[in-house]
Image (tube, grey):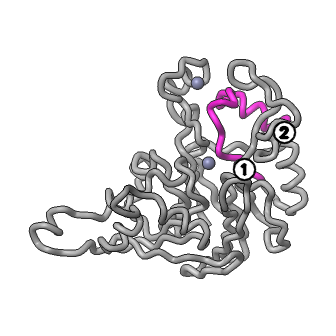
Amino acid sequence: MELTILGSGGSTTTPRPGCDCRVCREARIKGIPYARSGPSMFIRDLNLLCDTPEEIATQLNRERIGCVESILYTHWHPDHTFGMRIVERMYKFWLDMFVNQENPKKKVKVYALHDVMDDLMSMGYRGGSFLKYYQRSNLIETIGLEDAEEVRINSFKITPFEVQTTYNPSTVFLIEEKGKRVAYAPCDVKPFPKTTRLRNLDLLIIGSFHLEGALKNGIAIPSGNPLRKELFTLKEIRELGTQLVARKTVVTHIEEEWNRTYDEYKDLEKEQRVTFAYDGMHIKL
Ligand SMILES: [Zn+2]
Ligand SMILES: [Zn+2]
């Protein structure tokens, strides 16, 4: 199994436009891995994307990915979905449509839990839903999934587990192939699903975290603050990794507001015994 972290940023990406902090300044000069774009992952063997942040087209170009066959959505939040127009940017050919009267040649399969799909379907303008428009245009086929329902794509088995957060449903995807087991849980995954089916992992890729101590502008998250209900500390992520019997944990969805440079995350890795993702990180299992 070959995975690529296309984007390791969170809902705030680095550099943040207009921000003159030292982290953003360095990222602007040095680029990747100091710069972090929106949260997304690609499974090479399946041409499958997990989520489509705003920067998805740039991410695909950067990694020389020329084909997307499927998209899994974890939840509706803008940092995970506002690049959904990628299906149109890749596969809608105006000249074929209007001159030769031809439909798009490719339909991308879009998978999400039913509740998440309802959220996605409600995104649009007063004339209707964006995804319904893509359906009508023969650009996508949508597939709603039950909680814990396995989907088989080629030699892979993919299982979504629903997470009920305070505001919306989100998803942890279990991805299995040839005895390897990966959980992709980039955002809004606290409380983590209790199921034993997510135990015994080769890799846990997880977001929904914050750092302790002084963050951007010296602000720290006080105990009892609502953010602590939504986000894990690194200690909690380590404990979760142990509980799940995960052989390796990669932390992603790294916010600009945590105010750490790529080099500082490298130092934190030694101290915290986790690995931090970066844009373009390739993982082979
Ligand atoms: Zn900044
Ligand atoms: Zn997010």
Q: Is residue 78 above or below residue 76?
A: above
Mark 1 residue element:
strand
Where does label 2 land, which residue? 272
Residue range of the region highlighted in magenta in the rendering: 249-271
Q: Amino acid at mark 1?
A: Val
User: Counting residues from the N terminus, which is met first, the one under dot 1 or under dot 2?
Assistant: 1
Q: Residue at x 80, y 30 (%)?
A: 221
Magenta run includes residue 253: yes
Mark 1 and mark 2: Cα distance apart in space = 12 Å
Q: Which quadrant does the C terminus fall into?
A: bottom right
Where does label 1 land, which residue? 250
Asked if disc 1 and disc 2 are in contact, CB closer than 8 Å, the reply is no
Mark 2 residue element:
helix
Q: Residue at x 56, y 57 (%)?
A: 76
Whole-percent x, y for residue 215 in the image? 73, 25
Q: Amino acid at mark 2?
A: Gln
Q: Residue at x 59, y 82 (%)?
A: 152
Left or right of 220: which side holds 67? left
Q: Quadrant of ligand 1?
A: top right
Determine which of the numbered discs, if any, sits on residue 260 in the image.
none
Magenta run includes residue 41: no
Question: From this viewpoint, which residue is outermost toward the front?
Answer: 126
